[in-house]
Amino acid sequence: MDLIFDKTTTNIEWLRDDVPESLIRAISSLRLALQKTPIYFNGNQRNKGSDLVSAAEIKIPRYLNKHGLTFEILSEQEIKIHFQGVTSKDRLDLFIKIILNNVTWFVVIEFDSARADQVAKKFVSRIAQVPNENLVYIAYCYPGTKSMNISEVNKYFMYMKTISQGLNLAGFVGMTPPKNHGDL
C-alpha cells in the first residue's frame, strides 16, 4: 500500500493593495497552518471535512500567535449571529476575527472537497452575507473522488479572484490538493 502525503497548498492568492502588512503576514501564516493540517491518517484514510476543520482550529492559533495580533477563532458559526440582516441558517466552517488598529478584519475559511460547483456555490453564499470590505475568503479544498476535476476548481478560483476584486473584498485565497484520489 502506498502512503499518500498530499497537502493542500495555495493555488491562487490575491490581497487588496491597501491591506495592512501585518494582515498579509497573518494570512501567510494561516495558509501555512492550513497546509500543515493533515488530510490523511492511518496511511491512506482521508479525514472528514469536519475533522479537518477541528484540526485547523487547533493548529491556527500557534501560527497566528507569532504576530502578536488580537484575534478570535470560531467554528461552525451561523452567519446571522455576527451580521445584521442575515436570515439564513448558513454556517461558516471557520470564522476568524482579527483586530488591527481598531479595525476588525474577517477571515472566512471554508472546507470542501475539490469540486468546482460546491466551491463556487459556497463562495457566492458567503460573500452575499458577510460584509466584503474587510473580508478575506479562503477556500480550502481536500481530495475528492477521481471524477472531480481539480483543473475546473482552479479555473473557478480565477473567477472567484476576479469577483473578489470587483466587490473590493480584502482578499481571496484558493487552496487545492495536488490530485483527487477517489475514496480511499
Image: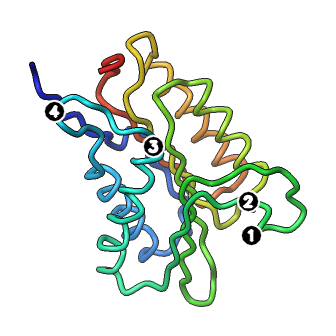
Say whether marks 2 and 4 touch (CB < 8 Å): no
Amino acid at dot 2: Ile
How far, Cα to Cα, is label 3 from label 2? 19 Å
How far across and how far down the image is residue 83, in percent? 79, 67
Q: Nearer the viewer, residue 17 or 8?
A: 8
Q: Which label sits in the foreground, 3 or 2?
A: 2
**Is 112 located above or below residue 130 in the figure?**
above
Q: Nearer the viewer, residue 166 or 153?
A: 153
How far, Cα to Cα, is label 2 from label 4? 36 Å
Q: Residue furthest front?
A: 42
Q: Which SS class for mark 2?
A: helix
How far across and how far down the image is residue 158, in percent? 54, 33
- Disc sitting over residue 43 in the figure: 4
Would you name the residue on which mark 1 appears?
A: 82
Q: Quadrant of the N terminus?
A: top left
Q: Which label sits in the foreground, 3 or 4?
A: 4
Amino acid at dot 3: Tyr
Q: Which SS class for mark 4?
A: loop
125 sits to left or right of 154: right
Of callouts 3 and 2, which one flags the residue occurring earlier in the amino acid sequence? 2
168 sits to left or right of 9: right
Say whether marks 1 and 2 touch (CB < 8 Å): yes
Would you name the residue on which mark 3 appears?
A: 140
Would you name the residue on which mark 2 appears?
A: 79
Say whether marks 3 and 2 touch (CB < 8 Å): no
Q: Which SS class for mark 3?
A: strand
Amino acid at dot 4: Gly
